[in-house]
Image (spheres, rainbow, N blue to C red):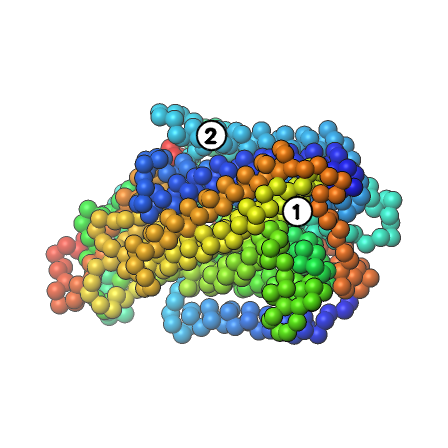
Amino acid sequence: MTFIHKYPKAAKVAKANFVVAFIALAIGGFFGFVQALHRTDVFRGFFNSGEYYTLLTGHGVLLALIFTTFFIAGLFVWGVTRSLDREPENMSYTWSWFWLMTIGTVMATVAILGGLVPDSSIRAAVLYTFYPPLQAHPLFYIGLALVLVGSWMAGADWFWSYRKWRKGSPDERVPILTFMALFTMLMWYVCTIGLALEVVGLLIPWSLGWVTEIEPLLPRTLFWFFGHAVVYFWLLPAYYVWYAILPKLSGGRLFSDSMTRIVFIIFLLLSTPVGYHHQYADAGISVGFKFYAMATTMLLLLPSLITLFTVVASMEHGARQRGGKGYLKWIGKLPWDKPAFVGCALAGIMFAAGGFSGMINAGMNINILIHNTIWVPGHFHLTVGTAVALTFMAITYWLLPQLTGRKLKFKTLALIQPYAWFLGMTLMSNAMHRAGLAGVPRRTAEPQYSGFEFEPIFGTMAEMDWQIAIGGTILTISLILFLWVVIASWMAGQKSDKPVDDHIPEPLSGVEHTPAILDNMKLWFTLALILVILAYAFPLLEMVADGIFEPGALPRPS
Amino acid sequence: MHIHKFEQFWIKLSFVLIAFFIATVVYGFVAMDLKVIGDHATIDPQNLQETKFGNPGVREVTKNGQTEYEVYVQTIQFAYSPGTAEPIVVPANTRVTFYITSPDVLHGFDVAGTNLNTMAIPGQVAKMTTIFPESREYGIVCNEYCGPAHHIMEGIIKVVPKSEFDKSNLVE
Ligand code: HEM
Ligand SMILES: [Cu+2]
Ligand SMILES: [Cu+2]
């Protein structure tokens, strides 16, 4: 018996979410390939430089917003169902959030791809941050709003299951797989307040022409109210996998139940009040607020550092169970020939590197050196582009058999895939970081200028361009391998009662050591809201004091 | 609650690291004069003509008995005024303050390879002060996507020796 046999309805929902996620990954990944060749001037024959921004919008939206959200929904359906041992409460409700998110995705994607049709009035080349006064077609904003509402409903679905379960088990502790999912969603509710105010309150009425002027700084600030926490919305599900599943894949068990819970609580509390660290270079926000956000950002290192400890400790335990010895020699005893393990472990290593460049981003005054340069994509291809995306791909090799009842096919290709991603990302991302230090801008179709040359500190521009192009190509090949393995296994994998070992052992330091207060969701949610109000109420009030749409700028076509 | 002793040690170490990072930022502020953009002024982006941005360029001012320069720059889809059609010329070893705003969409103003880097946001005036130590040319790059020809938006800052600085191009 595996998941699909016990919970056929939930398995269907999880699979539907994965289908949308992987389609988004395929299209978005192809755009990434084109970008890597285009900006480096290695090959510009696919699209012209004006269309580049349409592709880049597609890449950002489909990968950072759509692939992640749908994958997370599928993962949490699996985790909540399994750990509470109940199917979703009402399948019509469950399917309604799935379809709402899907319709929203189709609307936004049509609006973006419209930009490739000559003279089309449906365009949305506004990038995934959609800063006004560049204006997209209303379809784009409405589509995104539907995805958002759908994701709220999905969260409510899991809380619903939890409450029903709680009635039947009043004295039990919240199972860790449900705990982590619910706390991630609590954080999502807090941070999406900003996005909802921006999109529904300002951008939709403005794109429909009900108001003409808009104050650019206010929506931008609301976006970043959401924009840092969203990176934790992507990352926490990767942590979910690292905490709950990776120890098992390495042959051991989770190190500490309490620390896991504490980490998720800190993320709930601190993820949102730090958004100003994306606006260090903005005029109109005082240095004091920026400083407060900087200090909070640094504090947010804590849960990630604890995660590093717990994950490494759990893996070491696993390796020692498998006969590993010595200070570091145990690393060799880890299952480096198992795709799911390898993907998660390599993703974790890249995340540590991404953490380094992240610390530089956070340092308010050094940040100015790299703000909006290609350094920044260099950084987040390590975090969301690898720590998250590669973890999701890798764990698919373990989840898919449970959701389909079929064994994985092409295990060798599946094993090559994460190593290839790691190699491609090493090339692409190191070159992006270094080019950024020389001042090469991000989001630019042709970052080669007529009046001056960039002066790199390490290496040459030509060498960096080639590394980005070759790295991007290897990543694309890795992505094709992933999709091939998934499609083949899904369609033609050998049917089995137990297609994969899906048992998850208890933590080393179990829930019996965990203080009950950690499970008090009302308490932590209220505290999180208070912290957000402290950080944002005053600056936002200051911004709207002269009128919500003042000083007003006119819309510009994208 | 049980926290393993290695883990306790690791948590303490993490706090030390965090304190260290915050200290480096403070040190940069206080000792190295690394400032970030703050809240200077708001402006009506549709009426820049009536402000100093209506006549952008380099101005000479006297502050605390010292000769300094102010540079007003408009960032427009897809050029810097001044900066693109003609370079911004300023003397070396002299305080120069940039005031930057945009009448249309968001742009970037990044002096490539330096930490002179700000967003140009319609409605907001960005203010940055610096002293260029040597005479040389710098490229200005727009590093915020501003529309279909964003990639052609560039400019030049020309830093000349104080003695060669030609004051006939200053604006009033
Ligand atoms: C085949 C693999 C990939 C390649 C070759 C690739 C390539 C690139 C390149 C070259 C850029 C910079 C474009 C520019 O600033 O001009 C970029 C931006 C970006 N990528 Fe990727 N990428 C890949 C996968 C991913 C994945 C898996 C994610 C996230 C899940 C991701 C998220 C992003 C985001 C959010 C941006 C920024 C978009 C923006 O600035 O608006 N990428 N990518
Ligand atoms: Cu952030
Ligand atoms: Cu631009």
According to the picture, the residue beneath numbered tag 1 turns out to be A398
Pair 1/2: label in front: 1
Chain letter belonging to callout 1: A
Chain letter belonging to callout 2: A
Q: What residue is drawn where x is 71% and y is 46%?
A: A500
According to the picture, the residue beneath numbered tag 2 turns out to be A111
Q: What residue is drawn where x is 37% and y is 53%?
A: A467
Question: How many numbered tags mark residues here?
Answer: 2
Residue in front for this viewpoint, A156 or B122 = A156
In percent of width and height, residue B116 lies at 33, 59
Residues packed near mark 2 inside 10 Å, few (<14), some (14 to 19) or many (20 plus): many
Q: In the image, is residue A222 above or below residue B19?
A: above
In percent of width and height, residue A526 lies at 70, 52
Q: What residue is drawn where x is 55% and y is 69%?
A: B18
**Residue A418 left/right relative to B142:** right
Q: In the image, is residue B34 above or below residue A4?
A: below
Marks 1 and 2 sit apart, C-alpha to C-alpha, by 35 Å
Q: In the image, is residue A166 above or below residue A313?
A: above
Residue A502 visible in image: yes
